[in-house]
Image: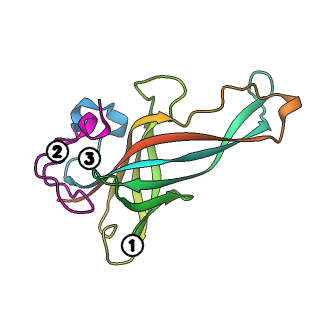
Amino acid sequence: MTFPSRLLAAAGLAGVWCAGAGAIVDNAALPAAVQVPPGHALRLWSLGRGEVHYACRRQAGVEGGYAWVPGLSAARLYDLNRREIGWSFEGPTWKSVDGSRVIGRALAAAPAPAGAGHLPLQLLRAAGASGQGTMSGVSYIQRLNTRGGGAPAQACNARREGRERRVAYEADFVFYGPR
């Protein structure tokens, strides 16, 4: 299945930002933890392609004493026509090509249905914004349909402490605003 058909009904989608007209996310079918509260409507869908940076670190309370710890992540955002429309980077922050940006604060996560090796699904609340463009007025952000991005499969142990790995991922980022 191609990426748009997983989440969206393509009828009526136009414009660089794939604004909500015709886009469908069935929140009722998602895990309760990552559902957007009532009173918010889909404003923007994008496909994020990027990397998560992991470092092998000593971790108290972890079996074996070491674990891959996620650090910075960065992705490019694309619309349904695969045009670059923005970026996702530390914070987490999303910035559109028009210069507007929104910073999210994680509220909840749920395991990816595809299983191990994939980033969890996530719900974030907008915690700050700047600019008067596409990202102004965003209230919630979902990370859905994750592929990849999970901790490296390579063992993390004393011999590998301090090593870093980059893991590729894709995810749908869905932006909502008040109705």
Residue that mark 3 sits on? 37
N-terminal of the pair, mark 1 or mark 2, is 2
Mark nearest the camera among 1 and 3 is: 1
Q: Is residue 173 left or right of residue 67?
A: left
Mark nearest the camera among 1 and 2 is: 2
Stretch of the chain drawn in magenta = 1-25
- Looking at the rendering, which quadrant does residue 7 occupy? top left
Residue positioned 36% across, 74% down in the render? 98
- Looking at the rendering, which quadrant does residue 18 occupy? bottom left
Q: Position of residue 26 (x, y in %)?
A: 21, 37
Residue most toward the bottom? 132
Determine the CA span between mark 1 and mark 2: 26 Å
Mark identifier at residue 10 = 2
Q: Position of residue 160 (x, y in %)?
A: 84, 33
Q: Position of residue 32 (x, y in %)?
A: 32, 33
Residue positioned 53% across, 23% down in the render? 116
Crowd tier of the residue under label 2, counting other residues whose Cα lies within 10 Å: few below 14, some 14–19, many 20 or above:
some
For the C terminus, the quadrant is bottom left
Q: Position of residue 19 (x, y in %)?
A: 21, 58
Mark nearest the camera among 2 and 3 is: 2
Front in this rendered view, residue 170 or 30: 170
The amino acid at mark 3 is: Pro
Mark identifier at residue 100 = 1
The amino acid at mark 1 is: Ser
Crowd tier of the residue under label 3, counting other residues whose Cα lies within 10 Å: few below 14, some 14–19, many 20 or above:
few
N-terminal of the pair, mark 2 or mark 3, is 2
The amino acid at mark 2 is: Ala
Residue positioned 51% across, 40% down in the render? 169
N-terminal of the pair, mark 1 or mark 3, is 3
